[in-house]
Image: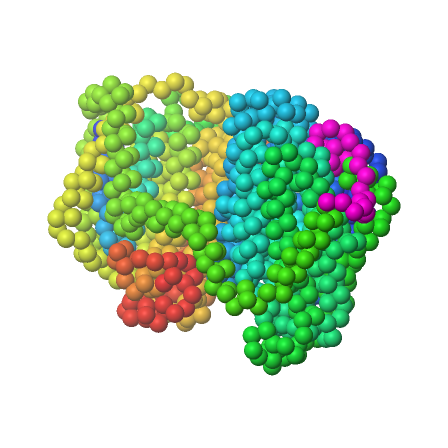
Amino acid sequence: MLLLVAIIGPVLGALIAASLCKAFPKKAGWILASIPAVIFVGLLTQVGSLNGLQAESVSFAWVPSLGVDFQLQLNGLGLLFALMIPGVGAFIFVYAGGYLHGHPLSGRFFTFLMLFMTGMMGIALSDNLIVFFVFWELTSISSYLLIGFNHEDEAARKKALQALLVTGFGGVAMLAGFILLATAGGSYQFSTLIAQGASLAQNPLAQAALPLLLLGAFTKSAQFPFQFWLPNAMAAPTPVSAYLHSATMVKAGVFLLFKLSPIYGGTPAWSITLITCGTITLLLGAVTGLFQRDLKRILAFTTMSVLGMLVLLIGIGGELALKSAILFMLGHALYKATLFMTAGNVDHGTGTREVTLLGGLRKAMPLTALAAGLAALSKGGFPPLLGFVSKEYVYKASIDLASLAPVLTGIAIVGNAMLLALAFKAGVHPYWSSAAKPGLGKSYSSLLPHTPHEVPFSMWIGPIILASLGLTFGFLPTEWISNLIGPALSISSGVATTVKVSLWHGFNLPLLLSLVTMALGILIYLAREHFWKKQRIGTRIERRSTERAYEFAFHQFVEKSKEVTLLLQNGSMRFYLWVILGVSGLLLSYKLLALGGLPAFPSTEGISILNTTITIAIVLGALVAAAARSIVNALAGLGVVGFGIALVYGFNGAPDLAITQIVVETLTVAFMLYAVLKLPSFKRYSKKSLRIQDAIFASCGGIIVFLLVLKSSALELAPTISNQLSEWSYPLAKGRNIVNVILVDFRALDTFGEIAVLGIAALGVSICLRPHLDRRQLSADDNLIFRVGANALLLTCIALSIVALYRGHNEPGGGFIGGLILAAGFILYAMAFGEKAARTKLRASPINYIGFGLALALVSGFFGPMTGKPFMSALWLPDFTLPLLGKVHLGTPLLFDVGVFLCVVGFTLQVVFNLQASSSDLPKRAVTSAKVEKKEPANCL
Amino acid sequence: MELLNAIAIGAIAAACIYSLLRRSLLKFIVGIALLSQAVNLLVFTSAGLTPAAPPIIEPGMSAPPETIADPLPQALVLTAIVIGFGLLVFTLALSRRAIEAVGSDDLNNFKNTDT
């Protein structure tokens, strides 16, 4: 139950965050913080209930066909990690509420933050490799969104992308590693795999998985050579840096290493890689950090350094090292989040994060100073803070090593000393260093953007509490601490153990080393200004780091992609068509040959003078349309083709098609008259040689199509579905016109899709022509005879269309034809009386006709489900007889056809009216006004 | 009969391809109009032609005669005609707007998406 709440809670939070921010702009942070707070308290009650390797699980099927279950597990390690997420998170939400006070996009920010928290809880609690991966990626994506939160800033976008690419690359590698590991271990369940322990690491597949898994962990936890994205991620708002990029997300990689430790721990590949990369990261981060002047960047480098220390400790392995790593991770979460938030406070209170400008802020910002100082002391490892305890254990672990002890202890001392210095730079220097002794020769206050002032309650309460926790942790009941740390250690070492964590170990070697570290660290701190003066060195180290390799790879990838894209997408329509048609032509030719070569010459049966003439007319019409240089000629050519084809339909048993085609051709001509006459006439742009090439190409295409038609009609087809539909038409669907029955009954859903397309096309046309709609209407035709005729014709068309619609089920006709006829009548009317008059006559806007038609068609489909039949099943009323009409049968297909009818009317009239309204200007306008129009946002491009 | 239709379809297809390859946007639209016609006729013809036998059940009968024209391609073509009309109309409106925005109907001048 708790497991589910821990995952679902943040999801709910993400859903309500945006509206909460609108409803309670001032309190949203507090309200949202209650979600992590509740989860935290819930998790806290579990401390002590899990001992050793005990765990609680829930599981339900997720993708059963692939054997992936949604498995969650709460074990000692997961609990410790999970506690940090909402524990720090609650304060982050409160803090962010103050930090983003009045920000217009705070809703978006909180949504992303909640999504991130979902991902982190999922990582902590998932017991399935695939589930783990999904949550892992969720954190990468939300991190991307949060780093790039100030998306107007190009640098922020670039850095966000960098973080996403690096961690995303690692994530994919990790997925591959998971698959190998699961294949090796025969399960996708973490706990099953971990139970196999070290024996699994002997499997060659599992060995191959290791580098991939390490890629995942190293990219996420910013280990060398992927460390460069972390300082760049500081482009994010401070709450994000505090939460994602120090306290939680960057620890996910470390968490994965903890989890894998029982399997791979102790193998040479594991130890060598982790110790090497960890050490490099530790030192690189600390050294580079010394030269930084920006508070947040100083902290980013210390985070990197600490992560290196954790990886190093896990690489050393064994109970002591793992224990110290766990304590170190816990301590870091508490003091680093605090330091980041106080850095944000300094930024908020003074307007700068440049440390050389800061000093003596303890008077203006006492509470922030208190929190920062406590955190810095903890980080520096002063007793009795948690940092001290964890450092003691680090030394214990490093001394305990047999061969590497001197080297690693030395590294640990140097690293810790530099971390201490950095902690003081970030947590002590801005507040306690004397304001009277300017850092680089100028007085502080004059350089600050505004006079320092303390931050609001919501921004200091979190840092204070978190910092105090670091202080009080050492005084908590030892039993409780053992209950928290013991199970976590058991899980990560694979052996059930209990631990005793104590604050004081007596006078021994670790204590001495601690004292050495403090002394060394304070010395480095005192020399801070020497490092700041040489800021360039830090920049140089950064520039020469592996980031260059990343940038090179990124640049090359983009450049090569551009080259490949340009090869295929060169922007020339002609080229595209040549490629598309050429390839299709070749494939078709191949298929023709593969099916037994050229078709036999077909029989000349059925050829008469009449249909030969029609064919010749069609051929000539097509050629004229293609070759015409004036629009009128082209329209005439198109018209001949259209009407010719209508005749072909008519002579070959397709009266419905013939009628539809004739009406559509008529409408097309009317439409073209409005649209095309306002466009420039054809121009010859291509050279003659190109035209000849195209003509040859087109002829080849024509010949292939010709052969294809002959071949297809010569093929003997098996009995088709049509026979079945014909047989069912009357007995089942009560219709004698089989074509119409197919349209409105058997395949009604298809037809519904098609009328929906018409509706969308009508909207598209309206949008394209909208800028002109307010122009004066086209002057109507004044011819009296035309007007009288148009009026009479409209009435005729209305009557005809209703007849066509009604009889369509049994005889040629139907919704499509009826709708087109009615529309034709209105268009004629609009020509005679103007578009406005026609609109009035129509009673409603054509768009409403479309909407109503679609709705009617849809509603007709729901009668089926209401009687327990599938969607769009036809239902009929009992027949009854009416005078004049004879036997009447009404049913849902008729309703559907009415929907089609209305849709077609609406569509046709919508587009024609729009065109008519926008066609009042002279054709010249189209070209001359183009330059002016360029400045307006294009509506359709 | 199939022979004649095949000739007609081939000729329309050739004219269509030639028109589509033109740089003039208006010619391109002519090509689209021809394309619909060619494809509709192709679908209609490839199902086999049955002269003068519409797929309609005579009054009093409950099943159609033995040889009727295939109703399924007819249903497909019927909607295709209307959709083809919609496509043509939409293309025209879009082109008109595009020509006004770009200031030319030469497709080679349609170089970027921000005009």
Please give the range of residues in magenta. A487-509
Instruction: Report the front residue among A596 and A898.
Output: A596
Depicted A877 relative to depicted A92: above or below: above
Could you say where residue A285 lies in the image, as x and y percent from the top left? 56, 53
Asked whether, in this view, residue A356 is left or right of residue A384, the answer is left
Task: Give the quarter of the figure containing the N terminus of chain A.
Answer: top right
Q: Position of residue A136 (x, y in %)?
A: 60, 41
Residue farthest left in this picture: A689
Residue at image position (54%, 42%) is A277
Figure check: A511 above or below A522? above
The answer to whether residue A522 shows anywhere in this view is yes
**The one of A860 and A786 positioned closer to us in this rendering:** A860
Q: Is residue A828 visible?
A: no
Q: Is residue A309 magenta?
A: no
* Vertical placement of residue A293 versus A88, above or below: below
Q: Is residue A52 left or right of residue A616?
A: right
Identify the residue shown where x is 27% and y is 29%: A588
> Is residue B2 toward the left or the right of residue A755 in the image?
left
Query: Does A491 lie within the magenta span?
Result: yes
Quadrant in the rendering for residue A662: top left
Visual colour scheme: rainbow
Q: Residue at x 74, y 48 (%)?
A: A511
Residue A166 is situated, as x and y percent measured from the top left of the image, at 50, 46
**Residue shown at 25% from the left, 37% from the top:** A582
Residue B51 in the image: x percent, y percent? 31, 28
Q: Foreground residue, A28 or A538?
A: A538
Q: How many marks?
A: 0
Magenta: main secondary structure equals loop
* Quadrant containing the C terminus of chain A in the rendered view: bottom left
Of the pair A822 and A756, the residue shown nearer to us: A756
